[in-house]
Image (cartoon, helix red, strand yellow):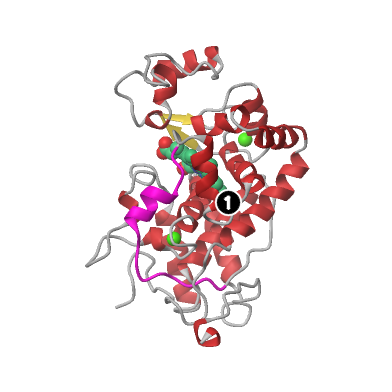
Amino acid sequence: HKTIEGNGYLYPQFYDRTCPKAQEIVKSIIAKAVSRDSRMAASLLRLHFHDCFVKGCDASILLDNAGSIISEKGSNPNRNSVRGIEVIDEIKSALEQACPQTVSCADVMALAARDSTVIAGGPSWVVLLGRRDARGASLSGSNQNIPAPNNTFQTIFTKFKLKGLNIVDLVALSGSHTIGFSRCTSFRQRLYNQTGNAKPDFTLDQSYAAQLRTRCPRSGGDQNLFSLDPVSPFKFDNSYFRNLLASKGLLNSDEVLVTKNQESLQLVTQYAQNNQLFFEQFAKSMVKMGNITPLTGSMGEIRKNCRKINS
Ligand code: HEM
Ligand SMILES: [Ca+2]
Ligand SMILES: [Ca+2]
């Protein structure tokens, strides 16, 4: 049974014979996409995370509404927020030209996350391959399993543990917020009414908070964008961790890493001091995240179009 269903293992050489140019194709389209839109690296990194936390890294996030499928794109974490799907489409169509029905959409996202990190100046790692694509999506899983920015430290940590990830992974992977942007709506509560008593979050640097309020008012401006790391929003570095120690983490979920748990505070401090240590751990944790319950062997399928299941 196991051999028919696949042994569950991914390996780097999976496409070496069947699509030797696969990695080259992905990399060149990512380079083009990021040169058009420098935020794209961040958006593609996040896409892989939002896929892997829902039913595993199986490209469930890419499916559009159709028949009995209710797209994950409409979930709270994804709606008006998830980006980069057109780039995955562009890569997939180039791959279909080169090697029809060979490279899964789930693997494309894993490669895109790595290449995006590298292009932004972050670490590289060897991407394990051989994931297959789901024949369904889970809107409820997307709403429940992906941590929300106003979740408590415990809730966020529990959501990571449910995916087999530990506190080291949580802190290192949160370092992704060294690039990319957040909408006002994702952190407004901190600026005006943190605990329901009409007071701001006093663990947020008050001059930074005042600056944020100018473009993130009490009401309106929901979609206004703010860099998660204002020091170097397009550079993948450890500046995110230094911001946290200066009480300048943008999201509540960033801030709790330094205020609610000793072990995570210690990790933040280490990564703030040692970029190399952060890079090495980030790479390891990305491989671990990419290994969340993949479909392998004859499970699932290789989609022709990442937005829909094969008919
Ligand atoms: C620890 C729990 C996490 C929470 C609560 C969280 C939450 C968020 C939120 C609220 C945003 C802004 C979305 C918006 O307003 O449109 C965001 C952006 C982002 N997140 Fe996270 N995140 C977490 C972990 C991660 C992880 C593990 C990764 C990647 C491995 C990641 C990568 C990103 C990136 C790169 C962006 C910027 C995306 C862009 O500019 O398009 N996040 N995150
Ligand atoms: Ca998924
Ligand atoms: Ca940065």
Q: Amino acid at mark 1?
A: Ser
Which element is circle 1 on? helix
Q: Position of residue 303 (x, y in %)?
A: 40, 73
Of the 4 image quadrants, the one containing the C terminus is bottom left
Report the magenta stretch's main SS. Answer: loop
Q: Give me the residue at 67% from left, 28% from top.
A: 242
**Would you say 172 lies left or right of 91 here?**
right
Q: Position of residue 213 (x, y in %)?
A: 42, 17
Residue at the outermost left position: 67
Q: Is residue 35 visible?
A: no
Would you say the beta carbon of the disc 1 residue lies within 8 angstroms of ligand 1?
no
Q: Give me the residue at 59% from left, 70% from top.
A: 129
**Would you say 141 lies left or right of 43 here?**
left
Q: Quadrant of residue 67?
A: bottom left
Residue receiving disc 1: 116
Q: Quadrant of residue 204?
A: top right
The crowd level at tag 1 (other Cα within 10 Å; few <14, some 14-19, many 20+) is many
Number of numbered discs visible in the structure rendering: 1
- 145 lies above or below 269: below
Q: Quadrant of residue 225?
A: top left
Q: Give me the residue at 58% from left, 79% from top.
A: 7
Q: Is residue 46 visible?
A: yes
- 142 lies above or below 241: below
Q: Is residue 209 magenta?
A: no
Q: Position of residue 160 (x, y in %)?
A: 54, 49
Q: Position of residue 75 (x, y in %)?
A: 33, 48
- 7 lies above or below 199: below
Which is more toward the observer, 201 or 64?
Answer: 201
Magenta stretch, residue numbers: 130-148
